[in-house]
Amino acid sequence: MSPTHIIFYIFAGFAILSAAMILFTRNVLYAAFLLIISFLGVAAVYIFSGADFLAITQVMVYVGGILVLMIFGVMLTNKISGQAVLTQGQHQFWGAIIGLSLFGLLSFAILQVNFQSLAWIKEAQSTKGLVESSTVKQLGVLLMTDYVLAFELAGILLLLALIGAAFIAKRQLD
């Protein structure tokens, strides 16, 4: 087994272990920090899989934006109420039943798929899974030329959502 494979499995293990630990913690702030570790592990798996654009997007959007916002929200809520933010765990039985059922259904669906017949897997096998160049430059050029309108509309929509959230938060503080 090559060192690259070992590092890949280490990062995959971090992602899986931190995701499993999220299930067993009652503190919401600890769960948010564990989610950061899980997302960073998934980003590393993307890098080793040759999906560097997805890895960058994972870090920038999920870790850099959403999780930091969640952590600030939890910390500010904690400061206002003066109590630790804990989950109640009232429906653990039903949560376990639904989770195991979904796991079984998804496992069954994955086992039914013939992955060898998929076109992108055949192409990866013909090139021996080697990624010849980074996709970030190609995607960046496409975003700034062919898809610039959609890119700008998404930016305006996110700006409006941020302004709306700030307006709602300001009204609730007054």
Image (cartoon, rainbow, N blue to C red):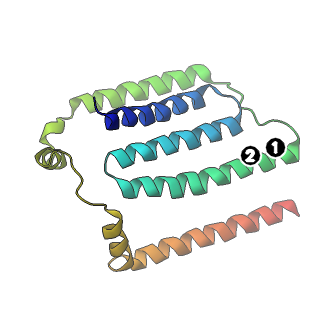
Residue drawn at the location 77% of the way across and 62% of the way down: 169
Question: Which of 3 and 121 lies nearest the eye of the viewer?
Answer: 3
Q: Position of residue 86 (x, y in %)?
A: 74, 32
Q: Quadrant of residue 139?
A: bottom left
CB within 8 Å, label 2 to label 1: yes
Give the label on residue 74, or none. 2
Question: Which of 41 and 133 lies nearest the eye of the viewer?
Answer: 133
Q: Categorize mark 1 by other alpha carbons within 10 Å: few (<14), some (14-19), many (20+).
A: some
Q: Quadrant of residue 92?
A: top right
Mark 1 sits on what residue?
A: 78
Tell me the distance, in whole angstroms, between the alpha carbons under discs 2 and 1.
6 Å
Q: Quadrant of the C terminus?
A: bottom right
Q: Quadrant of the N terminus?
A: top left
Q: With 14 as the anchor, is 49 left or right in this view?
A: left
Q: Quadrant of residue 164?
A: bottom right
Taking 51 as reference, is 14 above or below it? above
